[in-house]
Image: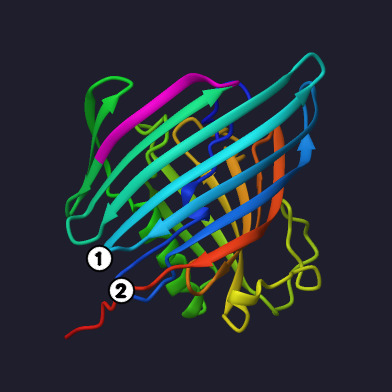
Amino acid sequence: MARFIGLLPVVPIALMASGSLAATLAPHRAVYDLALTSRSMDLIDGSGRIAMEFRQETCGTFDLDYRFVARFEREDATVVTDQQTVSAEDAAANTFTFTTRTFVDGAAAWVIRGKATNSDSSTRVELEEPEARSFDLPLSVFPSAHTMELIEKAKAGERIVETKLFDGDNEADKLLSTTAIITAVGEETSSDEGVGRVTDDAREVPEKLDGLRAWEVKEVYYNSDSDPDGLPLFETTYTLYENGISGEIAFETGDYGFAGTLTQLELFEVPDCRPQ
């Protein structure tokens, strides 16, 4: 997206975690190792790692601790970026609190901290950093609820999902929207190449996810600054399992792209949220 400081990417958190009262999803810790798949400007090479922990301590609350470290080899220097996000989503209160801190070569470069609250008709955003301000957006979906929406609609056989999304990025007042194209793993797909496209033949299913339904999701992101010709700000492709965990992931910013696999996975206890 147009959500960068220099070379810094901000990967949508919706790729990594989800939760909803509509289904039982898996609290977990996961690590993804990434390799550079495309580049422009003066990039020579790059690598990265995403480590995240998704918790559901009580029914209807979803906590995410997420870190993305990337190393960019440029012609004249090596740049290391470090994005650290902590967020909490409360389905009952319709709130989403978030703090993202960004470091470049170990130095603090950016921070955004605030809270968003959904009403029946709009999303109220109150920022505390980098400056105190508040504004209203059209009613938007928070990250975990968005991923759950994708799963529920995928199960129902829907193949295109359009969403207004609020994920707490550093251009929060520029209404973010996404269009997702969903293909069930095992179905025939078109020959059109997608960003970092995952094929059935290449898909390696982690042992802890074996036997679960899965979909390939290609999602494109737009905001009010998007190209008037319809080009997205950011594209992602990922394998989404029915318990909310992502397998293979890839993203393309226009300046560079990364792709990677799930290399470590630990499942946590799921709270019993069944009606008593």
Q: Which residue is mark 2?
A: 271
Question: In the rendered structure, which segment of residues is drawn in magenta?
Answer: 105-115
**In this view, 146 is above or below 77:** below
Residue 231 drawn above or below residue 236: above
Residue 267 drawn at (x, y percent): 49, 69
Q: Quick check: 27 above or below 75? A: below
Q: Mark 1 or 2 closer to N-term?
A: 1
Question: Which of the 4 image quarters holds residue 234?
Answer: top right
Three-letter amino acid code at the position of disc 1: Thr
Q: Which mark is residue 58?
A: 1
Mark 1: give few (<14), some (14-19) or many (20+) Cα within 10 Å: few
Near-viewer residue (52 or 182): 52
Secondary structure of the residue carrying numbered label 2 = loop
User: Residue 235: where, in percent of width, then height?
Assistant: 61, 46
- Check the image and report above or below for 6 versus 255: above
- Quick one: SS at disc 1? loop
Picture quadrant where residue 104 is located: top right
Question: Quadrant location of residue 185?
Answer: bottom right
